[in-house]
Amino acid sequence: MSSRAVTVEPAARVRGRVQLPGDKSISHRYALLGALATGTTTIDGYSTGGDCASTLRCLSGLGAVIDRQPSPAGTGLYVTITGCGLGGLLAPAGPLDAGNSGSTMRMLSGLLAAHPFTTVIGGDESLSRRPMRRVIVPLEQMGARIASVDGRPPLQITGTRDLRPIAYTTEVPSAQVKSAILLAGLHAQGTTSVTEAIATRDHTERALETFGVAVHRSGTTVSVSGGHHLTARQLTVPGDISSAAFWMVAAAALPGSEVTIEGVGLNPSRTGIIDVLRRMGADIEVTPTVFTSAEPIGTIRVRHGGFAVTEITPEEVPGVIDELPVLAALASLGGELIVSGAAELRVKESDRITSLADGLRRLGASIDERPDGFHVRGGRLTGGTADALGDHRLAMAFSIAALGASGPSTIEDAGAAAVSYPEFFTILDSLRA
Ligand code: S3P
């Protein structure tokens, strides 16, 4: 499936309304906390992506009872999870498979650190290349033992009921690392805190509060105390703004376009894309609607408004980390985009600086690679063949760039999109106008 090549024809414009499946980051967290809670949690609008299925698969292997159906509301899945209670996960019968999902592996490591058995957790070829020392170091300081070869998956985690609380300052801003430590800290005696140089997305903090756990925040430090039991909840996941980003960029790129995205998550730690797109020239209207399960939700309407020269600073990078490939796609069609302080892109599902530059160049773009970012100069794309190299966000970013090219493009490995957005190509065709 993931090796599927897709031909993307140019589009004059895109127009229409889009409803998105649930946010990937929030889906992972609701599932993880549901598995720790006492009672049955329901999650409506759960992400349909392969990554969030990996989290459910691992949690089933650890004793949570999980059922999934199509959502009655029509977007995403309706998941029920009967949790094992705090510290109550069971030793799995065999190794756990996190698939392509770094979030699953890193955040689950925080839970496994607190359970007194040994688990092996591995993943696919891409995940097996990704750095895990960033969770191994703090979780070992808390008392877990974690074996790996060179800090890469698979990890063999031996947890303990006697985790020590720590006060930890992360080396790279990472919501996954922050979350792994906080999830372990739920099981430690005393207060565990995490300090970040730049604040990252706060879905774990909000989700913990929703499940009844007190979270203390001071500047960029977040703390939780251990030993509080979680109560099962009825939850709704907002639409994924990182998936919305593809349609926002398509509308911003093609004159005469207008796309309205409904029910999308507007957590301020994720809305950097809106600010950057406005600076790049897009005409965007945001209407907050409801506040569900501790996450703000609203409607975003995007129209093409021209192109501008824009810079994304290192401080802004964590807030748009997953959107940088599609922002580069936009800049390849007009204006100019300079990004620095984004070396983290090199350790995502692929080296998202080299493979992004390579793929966009093959479509005709002018892009210079830098050690910690890139510089794209807009122009006329010809179309061509770009390889997503198994990376979902590259598959979708190249497809959006291809809409603005003068000729057709072939996106190799386009099936990778299913990791976060299986409906992507169907929606793409429905928006052509
Ligand atoms: C995520 C955090 C980010 C992001 C990833 C999802 C999360 O990763 O790139 O797609 O759900 O916490 P890092 O924590 O590695 O920055």
Image (tube, helix red, strand yellow):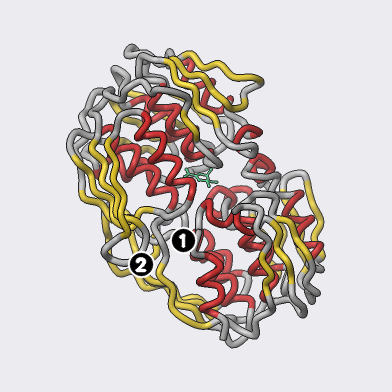
**Is 351 on the left-hand or right-hand side of 47?**
right
Residue occupying image coordinates x 32% and y 14%? 161
User: Number of marks in the image?
Assistant: 2
Instruction: Please tell me which of labels 2 and 1 falls first in the chain.
Output: 1
Quadrant in which the C terminus appears: bottom right
Q: Helix, strand or loop at disc 1? A: helix
Q: Helix, strand or loop at disc 2? A: strand
- The mark found on residue 108 in the picture is none
Residue occupying image coordinates x 34% and y 42%? 31
Q: Is residue 115 visible to the viewer in this orientation of the structure?
A: yes
Residue 275 in picture, x, y percent from top left: 53, 65
**Is 188 on the left-hand or right-hand side of 219?**
left
Q: Is residue 36 above or below residue 382?
A: above
**Nearer the observer, 107 or 334:** 107
Q: Quadrant of residue 264?
A: bottom left
Q: Amino acid at mark 2?
A: Gly
**Is 339 on the left-hand or right-hand side of 96?**
right
- Residue on which disc 1 sits: 241
Q: Quadrant of residue 35?
A: top left
Residue 265 in picture, x, y percent from top left: 39, 60
Q: Is residue 58 above or below residue 283?
A: above
Residue occupying image coordinates x 44% and y 73%? 18
Distance from mark 2 CB to nearest ligand 1 atom below 8 Å = no
Query: What whole-number distance in Å separates the C-alpha atoms at marks 2 and 1?
Result: 10 Å
Within 10 angstroms of label 2, few (less than 14), some, or many (20 or more) residues? many
Q: Quadrant of residue 208?
A: top left
- The mark found on residue 263 in the picture is 2
Q: Amino acid at mark 1?
A: Ile
**Nearer the observer, 291 or 151:** 151
Residue 308 in picture, x, y percent from top left: 68, 73
